[in-house]
Image (cartoon, rainbow, N blue to C red):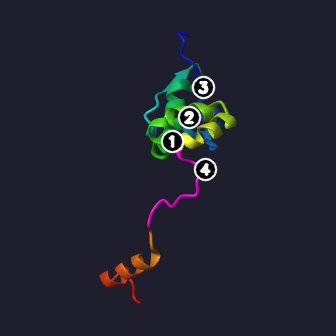
Amino acid sequence: MCGFKFISIEEVASKLIHEKRFAISWCINNDITIHTIGNKKVVDEFEFKCAFEKPRIDDLKRKYGEHWEEVYRLENSEDVVGFIKMEPMLGLGKNKVLSNFNANDLFKKLRLSGFTNS
């Protein structure tokens, strides 16, 4: 079939852990074309996979910056050892303070700006 692979709306619903009606709505909201072949509603598998994995990819980009693609490949192949070996390059596995956040300073600023009653 021209190299395209389709999955049924029922399969989409299963992957989304939802009912068929939600899957149709999700596809429409994610600009995925729903085709009717015979009496079955189907979507292009690659198009679905791109939309389905985009939130995860965006998260990996945020967390790992330029290394996101390698982490994505390791994650998809379930290569835990490869990921652990990559941790030093990613700056993971260290007890580091990510910010100089001070809750007392925040509360003081909120009180001065009138955001709290105390």
The residue under label 3 is 7
Report the quarter where the N terminus lies.
top right
For the residues labelled 1 and 3, the Cα–Cα distance comes to 26 Å
Is disc 2 in contact with disc 3, using a CB cutoff of under 8 Å? no
Does the magenta run of residues contain 95? yes
The residue under label 2 is 72
For the residues labelled 2 and 3, the Cα–Cα distance comes to 23 Å
The residue under label 4 is 93
Residue at left offset 53%, top offset 40%: 89
**Magenta span dominant secondary structure:** loop
Locate residue 101: give its quadrant. bottom left
Task: Tell me the magenta residue range.
Answer: 91-100
Which of discs 2 and 3 lies nearer the camera? The answer is 2
| Residue 88 appears left or right of 33 | right
Which of disc 4 and disc 1 is earlier in sequence? 1
Q: Is residue 44 visible?
A: no
Locate residue 116: give its quadrant. bottom left
